[in-house]
Image (cartoon, rainbow, N blue to C red):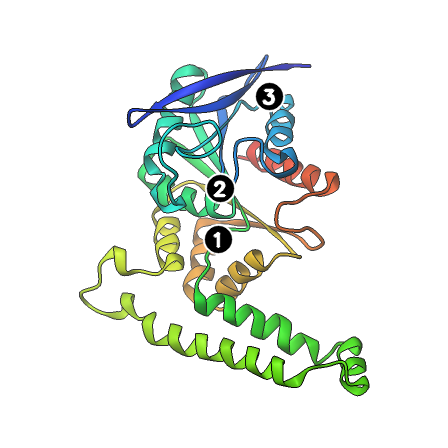
């Protein structure tokens, strides 16, 4: 084994954060900070973050995974992914101080941790890149569109749906009620999603996707986005990008790299999918 691991603690706002450093014997100058979304702790689902950081360490990439305040072993009150800037900054400070060979840091995050990374990264010039997996852009309007487009419309082309309809197993009343609820959600969301179009809007009035977009626009580093084909969170994010000229233009300008694992679920729970994520991450880190 060409790396070793050590338990660490990080001081943050009068509280201690706990984590694990994976240190290669011959490290490169770029490190990876794994930001953990909730409700998770630093091991990750099916030990995803443990396996990822060990594989990257074998590739000579130093990694730090840690718990935000209020999560896992870390002290303090639990907080939203929208309120962890101080935690990430403390972790970056510790990482660069403890590992003096590092010149820059890449933040790696899944789901709402990816969103937290997008909020934070543009504020810290030491962050050279982001690896974002299935970023969380959840809005009432967004999820309604996903179910309408990818569930209800898709069912019309499924043989199983027509078999149930003919045999009487299908309940049209329940489906109509569900569809009405979705359309009603779209209508309500459409009436409340105009904050950024008003001259006097503040940042706090922006929707989650708008704030994430601002973070991406202001970030000067490299970005790798990995999405799953069998995940509604990924589908909502991809639908947002595919229907927004602003997002598409920013992806081109920033040279954002997109990778899509068509058969993977939200947490990349099989060994094959985890290995693919680790390979994509490692190859991308070495490419620049």
Q: Position of residue 252 (x, y in %)?
A: 47, 55
Report helix, strand or loop for mark 1.
Answer: loop
Residue drawn 51% across and 48% down? 111
Q: Which label belongs to residue 60?
A: 3
Mark 3 packing: few (<14 Cα in 10 Å), some, or many (20+)?
many
Query: Residue 265 or 276: which is nearer the viewer?
Result: 265
Residue drawn 37% across and 30% down? 126
Q: Nearer the viewer, mark 2 or mark 3?
A: 2
Report helix, strand or loop for mark 2.
Answer: loop
Mark 2 packing: few (<14 Cα in 10 Å), some, or many (20+)?
many
Q: Position of residue 16 (x, y in %)?
A: 37, 23
Query: Are the two marked residues, 1 and 2, in contact with CB atoms closer than 8 angstroms?
Result: yes
Dot placed on the residue nearer the N-terminal end, 1 or 3: 3
Q: Which label belongs to residue 37?
A: 2
Residue drawn 55% across and 34% down? 285
Specify whether 6 is left or right of 120.
Answer: right
For marks 2 and 3, give the CA distance. 25 Å
Q: Which label belongs to residue 136?
A: 1
Q: Position of residue 275 (x, y in %)?
A: 70, 37
Asked whether residue 256 appears in the rendered view, the answer is: yes
Query: Are the two marked residues, 2 and 3, in contact with CB atoms closer than 8 angstroms?
Result: no
């Amino acid at each position: 084994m060409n790396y070793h691991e050590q338990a660490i603690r990080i001081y943050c706002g009068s509280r201690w954060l706990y984590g694990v450093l994976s240190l290669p014997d011959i490290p490169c100058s770029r490190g990876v900070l794994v930001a953990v979304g909730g409700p998770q702790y630093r091991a990750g689902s099916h030990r995803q973050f443990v396996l990822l950081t060990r594989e990257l360490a074998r590739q000579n990439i130093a990694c730090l995974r840690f718990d935000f305040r209020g999560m896992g072993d870390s002290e303090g009150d639990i907080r939203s992914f929208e309120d962890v800037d101080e935690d990430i900054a403390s972790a970056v400070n510790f990482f660069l101080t403890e590992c003096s060979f590092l010149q820059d840091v890449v933040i790696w995050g899944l789901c709402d941790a990816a969103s937290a990374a997008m909020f934070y990264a543009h504020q810290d010039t030491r962050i050279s890149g982001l690896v974002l997996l299935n970023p969380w852009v959840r809005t009432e309007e967004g999820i309604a569109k996903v179910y309408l487009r990818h569930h209800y419309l898709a069912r019309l082309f499924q043989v199983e749906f027509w078999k149930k309809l003919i045999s009487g197993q299908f309940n049209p009343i329940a489906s109509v009620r569900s569809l009405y609820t979705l359309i009603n959600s779209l209508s309500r969301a459409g009436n409340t999603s105009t904050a950024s179009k008003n001259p006097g809007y503040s940042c706090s009035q922006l929707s989650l996707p708008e704030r994430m977009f601002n973070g991406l626009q202001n970030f000067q580093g490299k970005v790798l986005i990995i999405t799953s084909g069998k995940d509604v969170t990924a589908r909502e994010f991809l639908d947002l990008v595919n229907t927004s000229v602003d997002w598409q233009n920013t992806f081109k300008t920033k040279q954002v790299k997109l990778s899509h694992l068509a058969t993977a679920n939200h947490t990349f729970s099989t060994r094959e999918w985890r290995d693919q994520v680790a390979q994509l991450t490692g190859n991308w880190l070495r490419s620049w």
